[in-house]
Image: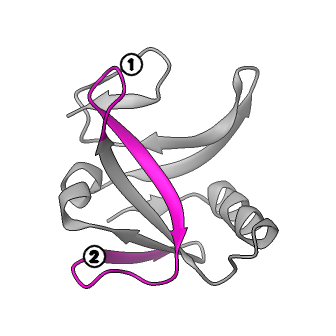
Amino acid sequence: MVSITPLAAQKVKEISEAEGLQGQGLRLRVIGGGCAGFQYDLYFEEKPGEMDENFESNGVKLFIDPLSYQYLDGTEIDYVEGVQGSGFKFGNPNISGSCGCGASFSA
């Protein structure tokens, strides 16, 4: 299962309203790239694919394809604001390492 914290859910809702995408789900996937091998990718999507894992957490619908789900099971998405900027943070128990900036990971 994948979950999203209340703060991150609030931020997702703010973004979806600002972009006129209310009611859409959040697509979460893992793509190749970054200095550690994999990166997270988030974007809004109207409906899940036929094979997707579907979750709802704190009022946000999450869609994850089967290939990405094997790397994301157990992940918690949070939103952080700090001196170095703000953004979504992934608490992923499946990673074996990450890059120094935290933008990519290895499994």
Relative to 35, is 89 above or below? below
Amino acid under disc 1: Cys
Q: Quadrant of residue 49?
A: bottom left
Where is residue 78 shown, x and y percent of the image? 57, 48
Residue found farthest to the right: 18
Which residue appears at 23% of the width and 49% of the height?
71
Q: With respect to residue 9, does 87 lie above or below?
A: above
Residue depicted at x 38% and y 81%: 48
Q: Which portion, as a residue range, is magenta?
A: 32-56
Q: Secondary structure at mark 1?
A: loop
**What residue is disc 1 on?**
99
Q: Give the alpha-carbon distance from disc 1 to disc 2, as whole Å.
A: 28 Å
* Residue at image location 68% in from the left, 76% down from the top: 21
| Residue shown at the point (18%, 59%) measured from the top left | 67
Q: Earlier in the sequence, mark 1 or mark 2?
A: 2
The image quarter containing residue 68 is bottom left
Magenta span has 46?
yes
Q: Amino acid at mark 2?
A: Asp
Which disc is residue 52 wearing? 2
Is label 2 in a helix, a strand or a loop? loop
Q: Is residue 37 magenta?
A: yes
